[in-house]
Amino acid sequence: MSSRIEKIVKTYRSLTQTPSLVAANIRSNGILSTTWSQRNLEKGKATKFLREIFTTDLKKIAEGLPVDVSNELLSRNSATEKFRAVLRENDSKQYIEVWQNQNIIRTVDLAALDVHGSVYSDVEFASLEWSPNEQKLLYVVEKKVPKSEPFYKRKGPSPNENGNNANGTEEKTKTIGEEYLFTQDWGEQLVGKKRSILAEYDIESDTVEILKGIPDDVCIAQPKYSPDGSYIVGIAYEVEPRKLGVIYCSNRPSTIFKLDLEGNFLKLPLCGYSVKSPIFSPDEKSLVWLQRKTGGPHHAAMQLVKTSLPLTENSTPTIVVDVVDTERKIHNGKTFYGLYNTGFPKRPWASKNRLLLNTPQKYTIKSYVVNLDTGDITELEFVDGSQLIVDVNEDKLLAVRRNYFRVDQLFYGKLPSAGSEETITWTEVTDCQVINGLEPFIYKYLDLSADSLEGDCVSSFNAIYLGPENGDKASVPFIIWPHGGPHSVISNYFILEAAMFLSFGFAIVFVNYRGSIGSGQKSVDFLLGKVGTSDVSDCIVATDKALEIFPWLNPDSIVLVGGSHGGFLVAHLSGQYPDKFKAVVARNPVIDLASMSVISDIPDWCYVEAGKEYTQKGEIESEILLEMRKVSPIVHAHKVKAPTLLQIGTKDLRVPCHQGTEYYLRLKANGVTTKMNLYDDNHTLGTVTNETDNIINTLLWIQKHLGIDEE
């Protein structure tokens, strides 16, 4: 191994020791139970660990040693903190554990029970909920499907008249000839999840029951007990005419359901909407959730709504916080751009029906208090990065603050009375630590204006500069990095790959082009039908503006990095501006919308982003496929000059790997220096071993093609 590669690996290993907060809980005795995650290169996966912090009067007095909890998939304390439930996985087997008084009182081998499939632990569907009387646990599972046998199979003795086989055990019902029957799952990162139902574990009887009454035409998500435990609410996803990918997509048809103890199932009349994260208000008078219209962009601004209890077939929502088109003024004259969160902290309620939530706002994530009764919104201000509320206990708040250069830092505070929330005083719980090697760098927010065409209703967007505060003229190479999505955003928090680039002398310009979330719904909608044009031009404006503002950036050493729709953009940029950029790294890039629309788990995305309506009904419209191809980077591939590295996941269902392969072969045919790495991974390339190879190869590729390859 060369000394240069050794230095890169050493730096990468150092940066992987930066932990990030996963979850936190304020205990009634003042203990803060916090869960963190850190990449573990030796194990090739992330290590999740528990840190307990002891406090008095909102101040830290001591801290326990970390405890590894990597095999905990889900965990939840009961309301009185008498019990703790854990869903654990060991050797691919799932167990439910119940803890009481510092010892385990129940362990359930779910595979041995053989009453349901795998328990869901993902963010979209999963729940692990205690009943109000703390006697039962509610969770989401895959429905167990009877095994199917072939039409011909030699069999042993037939069951006797008692329904038992020759060994005296009960013969289970089996289907015949359905071994190969296709059933859709929920796509990218939800492979194998086809039919979600509800299971309930009774602690006293030590039994698991599958709850009855759920129709076959829905899949259940995010269930919760009612305050009195007499019924369950949650999300019911529509499954017909087909399932479309849910991960990163807030636009899937769904509604709120109610299931009582007798198995009576009720769906609220929310036709044309997609719903997220139903929760009960603390006064037990309302059910609250987030919703948006179905179809359209894969993510967009959300409404915060409520409806009065009890739930009936005539229940309709009242809007508490509406979609914001551009911006609006809230308490204390602050500017607010709308809600883009799809969930809440596990415990989001303070006194007086005040809801705590976090949402992207332009280039940061901000925390807010929403008064459920009045709709008033108050920002809990933090100016040096992003702030997220992670737990609420009565009026005590636990928040994490983060930015590009620091380790996540915890703060503790008590929420003042209604109307005065912005005066909250925070106390440090963990120390402020600038990450080693990132001390010299700064970030700067750039509010930009696009070179708009006549009739454009949106011209503003933003970017973020990361890099040195000064330097010799044209001395610093830099990276243009547009985010994926496209209806996503890059916010101010630690990004390991960005830290690597900074550590080796690069500056970075993140581009939140028009179409990004966090800047009003009109900005989201603006991009539809303009992909490959307005988003590309925004990246060029950001590039040129950065060169103007930061004269130490080198106009002859600009490289492109992006994944998914960010990969779509860097491929477009290198084709449309072949002399401007010197190297390209694209991760699972969208290359041809037309071919992607046939096989992706979100074919509607291809149509919508091209400005078309998605449907599989009726005759195929060839003109639409042609329009999708016209806005794709494949049409500019013959103009590309910059050496291009493709990082491709072979299990990617969102942007299938043929997209990268098609581009690789076309670039090769046109004489472009090209390399493609294939990873046994999905769209995120998120496993530790794949990420390690991905990031280090990215840095080596950029250095090589900028001539920075001396030992």
Image: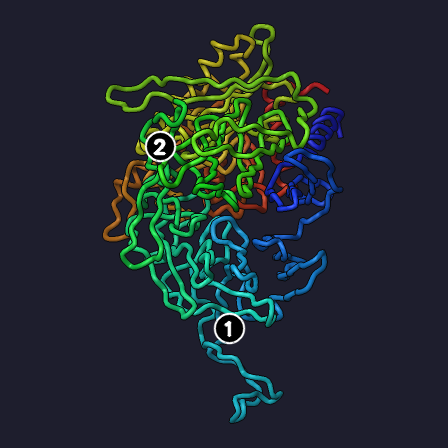
Q: Residue at x 73, y 20 (%)?
A: 711
Q: Position of residue 227 (x, y in %)?
A: 46, 56
* Residue at image point 68% right, 37% down: 56
Q: Which residue is mark 2?
A: 524
Of mark 1 and mark 2, the one earlier in the sequence is: 1
Look at the image and tell me in which quarter the N terminus lies. Answer: top right
- Seen from the viewer's position, the closer of residues 248 and 325 is 325
Q: Quadrant of residue 184?
A: bottom left
- In what element is the residue under mark 2? helix
Number of callouts: 2
Q: Measured from the top left, where is residue 328 in percent x and y? A: 34, 26
Q: Is residue 177 left or right of residue 474?
A: left
Residue 618 visible? The answer is: yes
Q: Nearer the viewer, residue 132 or 530?
A: 132
Which callout, 1 or 2, points to the residue nearer the camera? 2
Is 571 placed left or right of 645 in the picture? left
- Determine which quarter of the picture holds residue 205: bottom right
Q: Is residue 376 positioned above or below 554 on the image?
A: below
Checking the image for residue 147, the label placed there is 1
Q: Kindly give the residue lying farthest to the top in the view shown.
A: 473
Observer able to see residue 666: no
Q: Are marks 1 and 2 in contact (CB under 8 Å)?
A: no
Label 2: few (<14), some or many (≥20) within 10 Å? many
The quadrant where residue 467 appears = top right
307 w.r.t. 638: above or below: below
Query: At label 1, which amino acid type do we have?
Result: Lys
Instruction: Tell me the kind of residue under disc 2.
Output: Val
